Image (cartoon, rainbow, N blue to C red):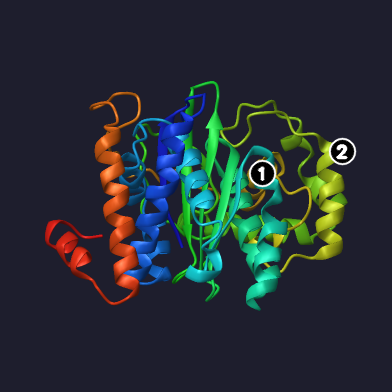
Amino acid sequence: MKTGYAELPLHYGRAPRWLFEKMTRLSRAVIEAIVIEHNTDEFLRRLADPFWFQAFGSILGFDWHSSGLTTTVCGAMKQGLKDLSNQLGIYICGGKGRTSRKTPEEIQRYADHTSLAGDDLVYASRLSARVDNSCIQDGYNLYHHIFIFTRKGNWAVIQQGMNPEHHQARRYHWLSLNLKSYVDEPHTAVCCDTKTAPLNLIAHESASCRKAITEITRQHPEKIIKEAKTILKMPAHHPVLKTDINEKYLYKILIRTYDRTPADFENLLTVPGIGPKTLRALALIAELLYNAAPSFRDPARFSFAHGGKDGFPYPVNQETYNKSIAFLESAIKKARIGQNEKFKALKKLAYI
């Protein structure tokens, strides 16, 4: 299921090399500790919790209020587990920008070594991105996508969108455990400091709109275009539309969907060319022709704050950081041979 959103100021630049190296080692140690004490599914559950992930980034020394926390923490985890993937049964694929586009081939490569159905995992990766980029039109375009899966075939997704105009980024979390639907209220927690009124086609109250949109795409394009002529000539004043609709382009997409006859809304999202503009147009047609209005409810419900890298609440203490890494790495080595005293001591202080 999708488990959250987090909206953060858009920051540029990179983490210092010395800090990233420490983040890589500490994130690796924390992940190993969680798997040793619990299992890989518990690690996925925690990644899918935006509060836990934010706290994790703060522990690693990154500033809580930066969009870079997402990309840098995910990068540190991927780097840290590079040589441990087979041992732990955890595989991390994707990343930021061009690296995110390599996610399918990375998934397939790991899946080939685990006898998992790579096509199913690639489908989950691609559909989660399409849902967040097209079905929730909140002004944030995805630029970061990371897909984490286990040897058992369970997975989590952490992806982030950018809104340069408002200098903010929004993070999206997904979890396969107990996933019931990609397109009907898949999220259970949303963290965001500001609220908007996005086109939300995955809201439960958008069910009739999703059904109508799917029905529209099964009908002959000429019929739909003829019925919607007056709609398509309207300027972009309707809340669903932010740009005028290109009638010729829409007709081409409708030809494609008519030929494929999508079984449902989820299947429709897999059709090439079905993006944000097309879905806005179809949502408008569904509302005006079939009285099936989409939701404009922002799924944001929580906001939060933590602490870190830029000197807030204090500069990173490298000596303490090194001691934390050493303690966890030592605990992990001893746990592998049955000596769990350090883990027991940690449990008395906090829950790993």
Left or right of residue 165, residue 195 in this image: left
Q: In which quarter of the image is residue 345?
A: bottom left
Q: How many marks?
A: 2
| Residue pointed to by mark 1 | 99
| Residue pointed to by mark 2 | 248
Q: Distance between the residues labelled 1 and 2?
A: 33 Å
Q: Residue at x 80, y 58 (%)?
A: 257
Q: Nearer the viewer, residue 155 or 249?
A: 155
Assess disc 2: are there few (<14), some (14-19) or many (≥20) residues with their C-alpha within 10 Å of its C-alpha: few
Q: Which residue is drawn at 37% across and 56% down?
A: 29
Q: Is mark 2 on a helix, strand or loop?
A: helix
Q: Earlier in the sequence, mark 1 or mark 2?
A: 1
Query: What's the amino acid at mark 2?
Result: Lys
Q: Quadrant of the C terminus?
A: bottom left
Q: Is mark 1 on a helix, strand or loop?
A: helix
Image position, residue 165 (x, y; %): 54, 21
Q: Residue at x 33, y 64 (%)?
A: 332
Callout in the foreground (1, 2) = 1
